[in-house]
Image: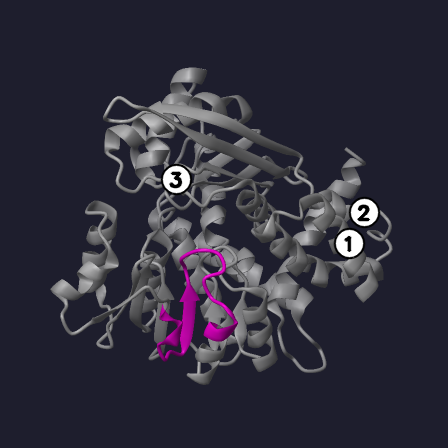
Amino acid sequence: MEEIIKGFLDLVKERNGHEAEFIQAVEEVAETVLPYIVQHDIYHGKNILLRMVEPERAITFRVNWVDDKGEIQVNRGYRVQMNSAIGPYKGGLRFHPSVTMSILKFLAFEQVFKNSLTTLPMGGGKGGSDFDPKGKSDNEIMRFCHAFMSELFRHIGSNTDIPAGDIGVGGREIGFLFGMYKKLRNEFTGVLTGKGMTWGGSLIRPEATGYGTVYFADKMLQTKGDSFKGKTVVISGSGNVAQYAAEKTIHLGGKVITLSDSSGYIVDHEGIDPDKLTFVMTLKNVKRARISEYVKTYPKATFVANKTPWEVKCDIALPCATQNELNENDADMLLKNGCICVSEGANMPSTKAAITKFHEAKILFAPGKASNAGGVATSGLEMTQNSLRYNWSRAEVDEKLKDIMSNIHDACIEYGKDEKTGYIDYVKGANIAGFVKVADAMLAQGVV
C-alpha cells in the first residue's frame, strides 16, 4: 500500500512539484482514500483520484485597474474549476497577496470534498487575485472588482460556476462584483452567494462558517458525553469566521479568551463576552483596524505581537485564520496544556505534522473540509432560495445548517470509526465520505 501511495504522489509531484500547498492537500487525501479504492473493485483501476486531482479547467487572466492617484495597477486573476461531477462549480474568491495557483488548486481540491459532504448538488472550484484590499479606498476596491468581473463573467453562471466570498472578499466586494456581472449579462441571477439581504442574500450566510465549525465541534464533544458548557476556548483570526465561531461558542456556554490577526493575538482571561465581541466586529468590519486596538478599550487583556494563540491554555481550539497556521510545536503546546478538541474553521490551518500529533494523542480533531463546510452549505441554501425567488426565516436556515453539520458528522463516523477501538478518525471519514459521492458520479458519467 505504501508503494501505491508513493507512486501516486510521485506522479502528482512530477506534474505539480512547485505547488507545495496543493501537494499537501492531495497527500492528506491520498493516504486515506487510496487504501479504500484498492479495497473496492468498483473504483480500483479507474484512476479516479488521479482524475480528481487534475482541474477540469484552470483560468488565469490580467486585471488592470486605476488607483486613486490615477496610476494603472496590474493584478492577476484566477478561477480553478476543479470538478463538476455532482453539480456546478462552487467555491469562494480570495483577494490576498498570497494568492497563487497552488493556493487556489489546494482550496479547490478541498472544496470538492467539502461540497460533497454537504449532500447538496455542488461541484468544487476556487478563485481570486493577488490584489490586497487592505489600505485601499472603497472606490479603488470598486474599480478593481469591476475590472476583475469584466473577465470572470465569461466563465461563470448560475448553472455553471457560482463563486462566493473568502479572505478579502466580504459583502462590499460581493456587491461590486455582482453589480458588474448584472450589467454585463443583463440578467438578475444567483451567480454569486453572500449577497445582501435586499438583493438575493440569505439569512445566516455571514454566520454560517463560524456557526458550523462550532456545531461540528459540539457533535464531536457529544460523542464523549461532553459539551461547550464551561470550556475555555482559544480562537485564531478575528474576521468573519472567527467572529461567529466566538458568538456561537458564547451562546453554547463556552468562554472565548483569544482572537488574532496577522499582527499577533489578544488574550482576555475574563472572557470575550457579547459586548466585547460587538466591539471586535466594529473594530474589524467597520474601522478595519488591528486586533491590538482591543487592549486600549479593555486594558485587562494582553496583546502578544507576532505570535499565534496556541500557547494559551485551553480546552478547545478553533483555528479560524488561514492555512498552515498551527504547526507541530503548536500541537505539542495545545496537548501539553490539556486541549481535548480541535475543530478547523479555516481551510487546512493545521500542518500534517500537527494533525499526526492530534491523532496520536487520540483527541477530537475535525478537518476543515468537514467542520467548516457550513459556509458553503448555506451558500447552497442561498442558491436554492434564489431559484425559488423566496427567503427562509433565520430560524429555518439555522435549523437546516445544524442538520447539514450533523449529517456531515454522521458520514465521518460511518467511514472513520475504528470498530475495535472506537476512535473516530474524522480526517479519514471526511475524505472517504466526500470521495465516494463524487467518484460514483464520475463513474456513472464515463470518461469525460
Q: Position of residue 243 (x, y in %)?
A: 31, 57
Instruction: Please indicate whether residue 127 sits to the left or right of residue 16 in the image.
Output: left
- Residue at image point 71% right, 44% down: 15
What is the quadrant of residue 423 in the picture? bottom right
Circles 3 and 1, Cβ within 8 Å, touching? The answer is no
Q: Position of residue 434 (x, y in %)?
A: 65, 54
Label 1's element? Answer: helix
Residue identified by numbered label 2:
47
Give the spatial CA distance, label 3 vs label 1.
37 Å
Residue identified by numbered label 3:
194
- Residue at image point 39% right, 40% down: 194
Query: Which of these two is toward me, 400 or 145?
Result: 145
Q: Alpha-carbon neighbours of circle 3 within 10 Å: few (<14), some, or many (≥20)?
A: many
Give the spatial CA distance, label 2 vs label 1.
10 Å
Give the spatial CA distance, label 3 vs label 2.
36 Å
Residue identified by numbered label 1:
8
Q: Position of residue 246 (x, y in %)?
A: 32, 63
Name the amino acid type tagged 2.
Asn
Circles 2 and 1, Cβ within 8 Å, touching? The answer is no
Q: Alpha-carbon neighbours of circle 2 within 10 Å: few (<14), some, or many (≥20)?
A: few
Task: Say which label, 2 or 1, has the lower sequence index.
Answer: 1
- Please indicate, yes or no, whether residue 247 appears anywhere in the rendered image: no
- Please indicate, yes or no, whether residue 367 appears anywhere in the rendered image: yes
- Residue at image point 43% right, 18% down: 187
